[in-house]
Amino acid sequence: MSAPAPSMYSPAAKAMAAQLGLKLGRANLEEFADTLLELARADGNVVAITSDSRGSGKLAPFGQRLPKQLVEVGIAEQNLVGITAGLAACGKKSFGVSPACFLTARSLEQIKNDICYSNVPATLIGISAGVSYGALGSTHHSLHDLAVLRAIHNLTIIVPADNFETREAIRAAARADHPFYIRFGKAPMYGLHAPDTVFAPGRAITLREGHDVAFLATGETVVHALLAAGKLAEQGVQARVLSLHTVKPLDQSAVLAAGRRCGAVITVEEHMVHGGLGEACAAALMLAGVRVPFHMAGFPDEDTVTGSQADIFRHYGISMEGLAETALTLLKSQ
Amino acid sequence: MSLAVLTDRDLALKSLHLRKRTLEAIYHAGAGHTGGGLSCLDILNVLYNRILKISPATVADPGRDRYVQSKGHSVEALYAVLADRGFFPDAELATIGHYQSHWVGHPTRHVPGIEMNTGALGHGLPICVGMAIAGKLDGASYRVFTLLGDGELAEGSNWEAAMAAAHHQLDNLTVIIDLNTLQISGRTRDVCNNEPLDDKWRAFGWAVKTINGHDIAELSQALSQAAEPGKPTCVIARTVKGRGVSFMEDVARWHHGVPNEAELKQALSELDAAAAALEASR
C-alpha cells in the first residue's frame, strides 16, 4: 500500500510530453463550463439543468451571470433528465449536467425513453466520469456508461480527449437536432491537437501515423496512448494513434483502416472492457473480416482497486509505460 | 365541430361514443388496457374537447397547451379521443399494435397529437415540469397537463418532480390523478397504500382539488384554470376502473383484459343503451 499518486504522469511521461510539444491545459470540465456559458450568452434558449451539481459542474459563474438559464432540480437525477427532456421538447437547447455515475445509472430509463426514444434535442453531460472520483469508490465511478448507452438507439456519445475536443463537442451538441451524451473528467489535460484540426462528431482524429501498432483510444486515455507511441518510437516501433472521441456512431472506416494497415490494434478507454470502445472496435473488425492481433486496455471485470485516479490508471496499465509494454507484449506474441 | 357549441350533455354522449371506439380498438388489437382507458376517458374527453388549446392545425404551434399521458398504458382511450378530434383518421384505430403500424401500444410521437413517448410509469410529471419551466422562461401563456394513475404514484420520480414543481412555482402545470383505486394486482391501498393523497400533494406545496372524474361539469371547472397563483394544481379525479360497462366496472382483471366477441357486443350494447337513455332525457 502506498500514498496516493500525485500525478497522472510519471516524470518520464512528463518529459515525453515536453518532447512531443504537448502543453498542459485545464480540465475538460472547465472548458465545458466556459463553452456553455459562451453559448448561453449568445442564445437565450441554451439552458443548463443541475442536480445540486452547479459547483461540481463549474457552473456557479453561469448561474450568477445567467440565473434564468440555469434550472436547479435538487439531488434528483431522474427528475433532472425528465426536465431536460421537457425543456428540449419546448424548444430549449437543454444541457442536463450531473456526475456521470448517477446520471447514467439511476436515470437510465429517462435517458432511454424521455430523451432518446422521444427524440428531443437534449444533451446530457456526465461530469467527473470514469474513475475521476478516484478513492471515493465504485459508487462514484462510471465504468458502465458507454456500454449501456451504446445499447440505446438515437444517442451520439462523445468522450473528448482534451480541451479542444471538449469545446467542439459542446458546440456540436448545441447545433444538433438529436440527443447527445458527452462525458469527461476533472483533471487538467494536455492539448493534443494542431491549431488547424477539424472536429466532426463520428470522425476520428489521427494524432500520429504509424503501421506497427495502432492505439484506438478515447477520452482522457488518448494522451497516454500518444505518450506511449513516443516511447515506442524510441525502440523503433511506429504506432498510429487515433482519438476516437465519438464512441457512437463509431468511425468504422478509421477503425478498419487501422486494422488493415497496422500490425496490431490496441483499444484504450476509461471504462470497463465490457461493452465500451474496445468491443465496438472488435465487432467492427470481425464483421469486416479483418484479422489482426488485438488487445483491449481498460478496466477488468472486478472490484476496482482503491486509489486516486492516477493510481487506478497506473494499476490497470493506462499510462505511457503500461501501454508501451502492452504493445510490445502484443507484438512479441505474434 | 366547434368546441364552443359542445354542452355537457354533448360531451357525456361523446364519452359513450368514445368508450365504444376504445373497446373496439382494443378488440381489434387483441391487447390493451381496458379498465384504465375507460376510467380516464371522461378526463381525456373534457381535456381535448373543452380545455386544451390544441387542435390538428396547431400541433406544432409553440404556444399550444401540452398534454403528456404519463399513464401511457391507457393509450387506446387517448388514440380514440385524438381520432375523434381529427388528429388522424378513425381507421387508424384498427391498426393499433399491428405490424409496422405507427400506432404503438403506448403513446409515441409518430402519432399526430402525441407530445412525448411514454409508457414507463413515473416519467410524465418530470417531463411536464420541464415543459412548464420552458413556458415560464419564455413568458408563454400555455398550460401543461399530465395524467397519472394512482398505482403509478408509487414511482419515486413523481415525488421528485412534485417537489421541484412547487419549488419553481409552476402554476401553469396541472396534474390529474385517475384515482380508480385499482392496479394490476388489486386495490392500490393493498398493494402499496398511498392515501391520503390530497394531504400528500398539499404537503408538497400543490393546490389540490378532489372531484368526480366522470362528471363533465366538475372536470371542466377543475381543469379550466390554475387553482392558485404560484402553485401547481393537482386534480384528484375519483373514477371507476372499467367505467360504463357493467361487468368491467371495478374489476382488477380488466386492467388489461381484452373482450371477446360476445363481451364486446354486450359492452357496446350497454353503451348504446346509455346513449339512448341520455338522448331520451333531452
Image (spheres, coloured by chain):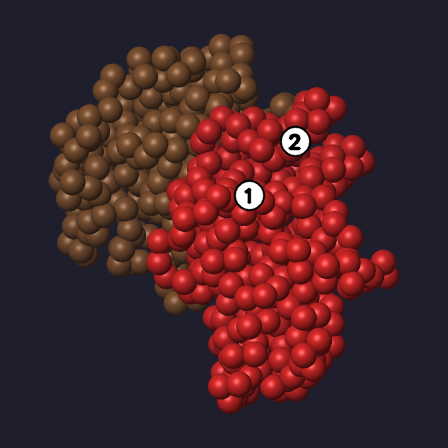
Left or right of A47? Residue A331 is left
- From this viewpoint, which residue is outermost toward the right? A196
Q: Nearer the viewer, residue B249 or A252?
A: A252
Which amino acid does the dot numbered 2 rest on? Answer: Leu
Q: Using the image, determine if residue A233 lies above or below residue B145.
A: below
Q: In brown, which chain?
A: B
Residue A167 image position (x, y, % from top left):
73, 48
Tell me whether the residue at label 2 lies in contact with that at label 1, contact meaning CB atoms closer than 8 angstroms.
no
Q: Using the image, determine if residue A219 lies above or below residue B40.
A: below
Which amino acid does the dot numbered 1 rest on? Answer: Ser
Q: Using the image, determine if residue B5 lies above or below residue A46.
A: above
Chain at numbered mark 1: A
Q: In which quarter of the image is the C terminus of chain B?
A: top left
Q: Give the residue displayed 65% in from the left and 31% down from the top.
A: A59
Q: Give the residue displayed 23% in from the left and 48% down from the top.
A: B256
Count every numbered label the image shows and give the total.
Answer: 2
| CA separation in Å, label 2 and label 1 | 14 Å
Q: Residues within 10 Å of mark 2 (few under 14, many from 20)?
A: many
- Assign a secondary structure to mark 2: loop
Q: Using the image, determine if residue B41 lies above or below residue B20.
A: above
Report which residue position mark 1 lands on: A128
Q: In red, which chain?
A: A
Report which residue position mark 2 lands on: A59
Residue A85 image position (x, y, % from top left):
54, 41
Which marked residue is nearer to the observer: mark 2 or mark 1?
1
Whether residue A169 is visible here, answered yes or no, is no
Quadrant of the rendered image containing residue A19: bottom right
